[in-house]
């Protein structure tokens, strides 16, 4: 997938970086690899994959607020808007959630949306860490995030991509073969389109097609 924007925040400021216009991203790569700086993400897998393949550096150390929130009783796969509402008591607009970030110039509304994407993340991180500390669960979250910082997690053999699909164990051998080919095709298609795999179709679609292959007349 193509890296079209990078938004970052510290307790003091928020910035939006345009990797389409800025050709030298070495300062960003250096920051991503700085072991002394914790990089906070929400649902980090796709971001980590794109950053790794663009910069050649896997961000580390990292903290994923979606993973951490689950250890505080929030639902799995919690959205960023839900996180901000739960831990910052702020309701974010959804106006630009489906925007095409590869088009230029970016509008003021797009830039504001991008900033909001990280403006409250650093605040939520502080609240989450405080609560995890009070409950003695910081080490639990650290252990859970360790695989996310492994390069092998983001270097996928296309023929093995189907193993990342949830509910895949419910498939028969024939259905597994279909799921394997679908997942490999999705990887190739996303690579050609310079896009994330979920933009082609998501894992739930893969399982649905594989489980219902008898009802398909063409693909």
Image (spheres, rainbow, N blue to C red):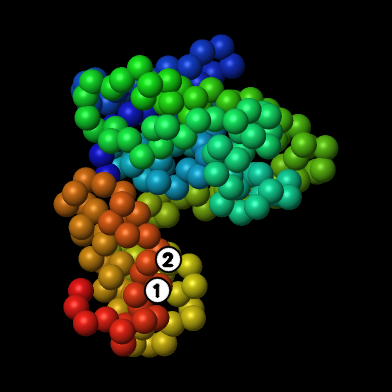
* Furthest residue toward left: 192
Q: Is residue 54 left or right of residue 62?
A: left
Q: Is residue 97 above or below residue 145?
A: above
Query: Could you classify mark 2 by the number of other residues whose Cα lies within 10 Å: few (under 14), some (14-19), or many (20 or more)?
Result: some
- Quadrant of the rendered image containing residue 26: top left
> Along the line of sight, which residue is nearer the eye, 152 or 2?
2
Q: Nearer the viewer, residue 138 or 34?
A: 138
The reply to whether the C-beta atoms of the residues labelled 2 and 1 are less than 8 Å apart is yes
- Residue 136 point in image, percent of width and height: 80, 43
Residue matched to label 2:
204
Mark 1: few/some/many CA within 10 Å (<14, 14-19, 20+): few
**Mark 1: secondary structure:** helix
Whole-percent x, y for residue 102 in the image: 24, 33
Report whether 140 appears left or right of 144. right
Q: Residue at x 50, y 49 (%)?
A: 148
Q: Residue at x 33, y 29 (%)?
A: 5
- Give the alpha-carbon distance from disc 2 to disc 1, as whole Å: 6 Å
Find residue 185 and name its label: none
Query: What residue is disc 1 on?
Result: 208
Residue 112, position in %: x, y? 43, 20
Image quadrant occupied by the N terminus: top left
Query: Residue 34 location, x and y as percent?
Result: 47, 27
- Please count the marks in the image: 2
Residue 82 quadrant: top right
């Amino acid at each position: 997938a193509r890296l079209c924007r990078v938004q970052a925040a510290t307790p003091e400021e928020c910035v939006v970086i345009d990797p389409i216009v800025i050709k030298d991203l070495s300062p960003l790569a250096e920051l991503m690899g700085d072991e002394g700086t914790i990089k906070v993400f929400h649902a980090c897998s796709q971001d980590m994959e794109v950053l790794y393949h663009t910069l050649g550096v896997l961000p580390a150390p990292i903290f994923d607020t979606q993973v951490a929130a689950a250890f505080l009783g929030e639902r799995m796969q919690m959205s960023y808007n839900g996180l901000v509402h739960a831990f910052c008591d702020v309701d974010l607009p959804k106006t630009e959630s489906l925007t095409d970030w590869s088009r230029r110039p970016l509008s003021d509304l797009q830039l504001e949306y991008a900033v909001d994407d990280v403006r409250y993340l650093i605040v939520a991180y502080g609240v989450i860490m405080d609560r995890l500390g009070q409950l003695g669960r910081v080490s639990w979250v650290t252990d859970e995030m360790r695989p996310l910082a492994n390069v092998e997690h983001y270097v996928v053999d296309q023929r093995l991509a189907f193993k990342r699909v949830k509910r895949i164990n419910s498939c028969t051998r024939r259905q597994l073969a279909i799921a394997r080919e679908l997942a490999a095709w999705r990887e190739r298609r996303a690579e050609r389109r310079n896009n994330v795999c979920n933009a082609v179709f998501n894992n739930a679609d893969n399982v649905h097609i594989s489980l219902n292959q008898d009802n398909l007349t063409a693909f």
